């Protein structure tokens, strides 16, 4: 879904036929300046989306961002928007919903990136995203120093357990995938060291190591050295990610970046002009 369409749907969901409270209480000609404040430590993402929300409500609104996306900060002023008070209030909730959600993704990503700093491992996102918001959530991951995995089922081949079972095993699935790939990247999921050996023998150049112990990860990395890149996956937390990174894997995929990130606490404070 295009971002503009997503914004329009969100505005329609919230506004319906109009903001009846503001129409009843706020003078039509009232002007205001609003400050969006960050109330907890974290990284901001989604500034352009929030700006677009306000301009979609009223193109005459003036927007100014005060922060750089993806940079860790303890709190403070994020952005200002000025113009019609009714228009600001009409866009407030939708703009903050996007901004809080995407900043939450960026904040959790930044925590994981910090946790593996110096190891050489890179943090990957997954397809476990909010329906309709994948592009925005992946942008938030990237802004905070994470790396985007494939966008969908169409831009890379990832042979998983169910594919391998249906194809007759990891080795056969790998051979079929490589034969059909063309220019697409190919990655093969392996749950055991025997699977790793099969995938490598079949020519896999990237191996996903699923739910392996730290010792198994080290052995898999050694077997793949010079032959394939390695990615650890499965149940990764902030408490375990450093140990996983120190096994020598190239990538660590973390579904929680997008499926479990708590929203960053933001508020909009309005002053009349």
Image (cartoon, rainbow, N blue to C red):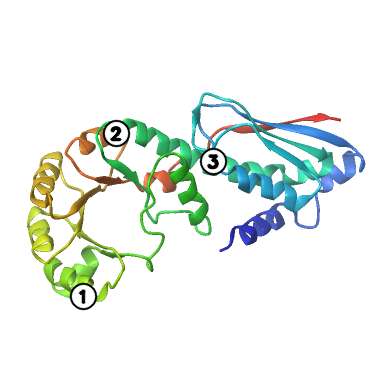
Number of labels in the image equals 3
Q: Quadrant of residue 122?
A: top left
Q: Element at badge 1?
A: helix
N-terminal of the pair, mark 2 or mark 3, is 3
Instruction: Point out residue 236 in the picture as x, y percentages from the top left corner.
Output: 28, 42
Q: Residues within 10 Å of mark 1 (few under 14, many from 20)?
A: few
Q: Is residue 2 above or below residue 139?
A: below
Q: Element at badge 3?
A: loop
Q: Is residue 137 above or below residue 78?
A: below
Q: Is residue 170 above or below residue 222?
A: below
> Alpha-carbon distance for marks 2 and 3?
21 Å
Q: Residue at x 54, y 43 (%)?
A: 101
N-terminal of the pair, mark 2 or mark 1, is 2
Instruction: Point out residue 126 in the picture as x, y percentages from the top left corner.
Output: 37, 53
Where, quadrant-wise, is the N terminus in this rendering? Answer: bottom right
Q: Residue at x 52, y 55 (%)?
A: 133
Which residue bears the numbered disc 1?
A: 179
Point out the frontmost of discs 2 and 1: 1
Q: Residues within 10 Å of mark 2 (few under 14, many from 20)?
A: many
Where, quadrant-wise, is the C terminus in this rendering? Answer: top right
N-terminal of the pair, mark 1 or mark 3, is 3
Q: Is residue 150 above or below residue 21?
A: below
Which residue bears the numbered disc 3?
A: 45
* Camera-side residue of 226 and 8: 226
Q: Element at badge 2?
A: loop
Contact between labelled residues 1 and 2, with CB atoms less than 8 Å apart: no
Which residue bears the numbered disc 2?
A: 116
Instruction: Point out residue 119 in the picture as x, y percentages from the top left corner.
Output: 24, 34
Q: Is residue 262 visible?
A: no
């Amino acid at each position: 879904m295009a971002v503009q369409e997503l914004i329009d749907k969100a505005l329609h969901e919230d506004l319906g036929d109009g903001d009846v409270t503001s129409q009843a209480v706020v003078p039509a000609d009232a002007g205001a300046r609003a400050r969006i404040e960050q109330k907890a430590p974290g990284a901001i993402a989604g500034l352009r989306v929030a700006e677009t929300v306000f301009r979609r409500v009223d193109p005459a609104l003036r927007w100014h961002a005060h922060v750089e996306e993806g940079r860790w900060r303890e709190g403070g002023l994020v952005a200002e928007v000025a113009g019609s008070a009714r228009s600001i209030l009409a866009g407030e909730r939708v703009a903050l919903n996007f901004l809080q959600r995407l900043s939450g993704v960026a904040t959790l990503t930044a925590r994981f990136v910090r946790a593996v700093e110096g190891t050489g491992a890179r943090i990957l996102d997954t397809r476990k995203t909010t329906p309709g918001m994948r592009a925005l959530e992946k942008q938030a991951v990237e802004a905070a120093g994470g790396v985007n995995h494939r966008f969908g089922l169409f831009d890379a081949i990832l042979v998983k357990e169910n594919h391998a079972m249906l194809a007759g095993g990891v080795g056969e699935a790998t051979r079929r995938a490589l034969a059909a790939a063309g220019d697409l990247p190919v990655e093969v999921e392996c749950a055991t060291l025997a699977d790793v050996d099969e995938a490598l023998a079949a020519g896999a150049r990237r191996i996903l190591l699923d739910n392996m112990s730290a010792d198994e990860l080290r052995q898999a990395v050694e077997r793949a050295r010079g032959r394939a890149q390695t990615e650890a996956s499965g149940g990764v937390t902030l408490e375990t990610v450093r140990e996983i990174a120190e096994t020598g894997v190239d990538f660590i995929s973390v579904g929680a970046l997008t499926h479990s990130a708590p929203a960053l606490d933001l508020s909009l404070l309005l002053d009349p002009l």
